[in-house]
Image (cartoon, helix red, strand yellow):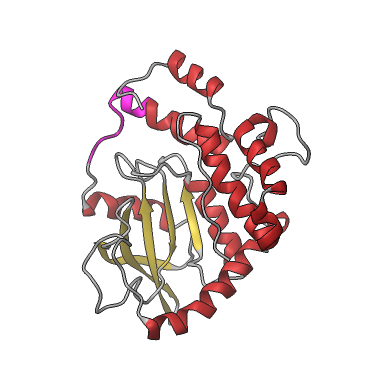
Amino acid sequence: MKATADPEWIAQVRQRYPVEPALDKVFTRKMTCRSSGGNHRHYSLEETGRQLEACIGTLFDGELSIEGLRPLSGGASQEQYYFEVRQRNGDDVKVRRLVLRREPDEAICAANRLREFQLMRAATAVAPVPFPHFVDEDGVIFGRPSMICDFASGVQKPSSGSGNVSGIGILFGPALREKLAPQFIQYLAAIHTLDLSRATVDALHQPVQGRQRGNGTADQFPGAAVGRGQARSHPAAQRGGALAAQKYAGSRSCVDGARRLPQRQLPVRR
């Protein structure tokens, strides 16, 4: 991406490389902020606490107080904070453990916070996903796009493993694989069979069925269409069935669509 980009250049890129509306908004915001100097500033814990106080009252009733606000380790692509909300209604006191997830000045991966919020809320029906309570899509309250969700107890990798901050280099030994594999398959299948027509996911572009130009379907991205067409007759489709064909189509469409990368056939594991 360019260090600076004027509206005319952004419009040319949009016309040449069309993407779905939610991603277009994210990329446009990123380039616009970069060109204008953006909102490159650090928010202290005190400022973040005041921002939380500005929105918590709209989420929960009763007498509220925020306690234990601190940064979370891991998830380096976003700013994350742990905090607790003490909610008092008469003699009844409830403590909610929550997480604030905020976009940093320059994210490694561009993400649409509203889409993340909507998909997490939909997935709570079939998987142990932290329930999202609030989304600040445009950073009106928190300065940058943010979300508040429940805190999930546990660890994201073996406690005896490496100290890497990312997922690279993590080893799940045989004992853990035996326990985790069935859960992983169960939740993966549940997520992929989730009926999104019953959920609010308007931040996720859903093209009209058919091959029509301009609606995000195959004809708008010729590389993907070629990949699927080749997959039907490729030996992988005959040997491994539909799943193998989809794997082959996905790998080929990424390579063919880039145009500049060498085209090659990746091996299909059965």
Is residue 206 in view? no
Q: Residue at x 62, y 68 (%)?
A: 189
**Would residue 216 be counted in the magenta stretch?**
no
- Residue 26 is situated, as x and y percent measured from the top left of the image, at 46, 36
Q: Residue furthest right?
A: 210
- Is residue 214 rendered to the left or right of residue 144? right
Residue 5 place in picture, x, y as percent: 37, 19
Give the extent of the magenta segment: 32-41
Q: Give the x, y percent position of residue 93.
A: 41, 79
Determine whether 247 is above or below 206 in the image: below
Q: Where does residue 237 sit, x and y in percent of width and height?
A: 68, 55
Give yes or no for residue 34 being in the magenta stretch: yes
Side (left or right) of 268 relative to 84: right
Q: What residue sits 50% from the left and 60% below the top? A: 133
| Viewer-proximal residue among 244 and 30 | 244
Left or right of 145 in this view: 131: right
Q: Residue at x 36, y 76 (%)?
A: 172
Quarter of the figure that contains the C terminus: bottom right
Residue 75: in sight, yes or no? yes
Q: Choose between 149 and 190: the one closer to the eye.
A: 190
